[in-house]
Image (tube, rainbow, N blue to C red):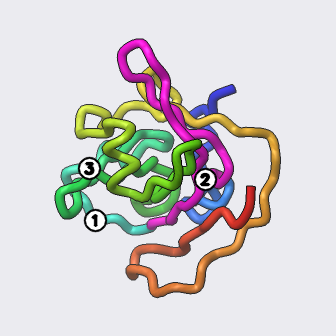
Amino acid sequence: MKLWENFFNRKAQEVAPELLGMRLYRKLDDRIIGGIISETEAYLGIDRKDQKDILASPGKIYVMPFMGHMLLNVSTKDDVPSCVYIREMLTRNGIYGPGKMTKKLKIDKSLDGKSISGQDMWIEPIGDYYQLQPSEITLPSACTGRYILKSI
């Protein structure tokens, strides 16, 4: 069962830890690929005038280019533009960090503004709950927390 856009109609720091352990799927032609979300970050106060419309509506995919890679974010609801950055996923073949994950899932700017509950990409809960802990690392000023899946 897909998560619908209303799941993201909350603060990024509430949504980010709840995405851990859920499955991220991407439909490519006639096949579906994906993995388990294992690391997320919550961002508030994003000042991206070019993405104002995407960030104003919860549950929209926001693809941000960074150092030659595409980073996958999903917009959330807050008083300021906010999103959850999906940093890492686990698959049967190993762990995929931000750059490798988006390459494997063929994430590009064509997904910008599309629903995370759509035909191209979606998230499904697995049904189990995991022990979640914010990591103890230095975070960018707009980041309110990094969340890492500790066990499966």
- Relative vertical location of residue 111 with respect to residue 14 in this rendering, above or below: above
Q: Position of residue 127 (x, y in %)?
A: 80, 40
Question: Which numbered circle lies on residue 47?
Answer: 1
Amino acid type of disc 2? Arg
Secondary element type, mark 3:
helix
Left or right: 118 in relation to 56: right
Give the residues drawn in magenta, as a range: 19-43
Secondary element type, mark 1:
loop
Q: CA distance from mark 2 to mark 1?
A: 19 Å
Q: CA distance from mark 3 to mark 1?
A: 9 Å
- Relative vertical location of residue 127 with respect to residue 66 in this rendering, above or below: above
Q: Are marks 3 and 2 in contact (CB under 8 Å)?
A: no
Q: Residue at x 39, y 68 (%)?
A: 45
Q: Residue at x 65, y 44 (%)?
A: 22
Residue occupied by mark 3? 51
Amino acid type of disc 3? Gln
- Relative vertical location of residue 88 with respect to residue 45 in this rendering, above or below: above
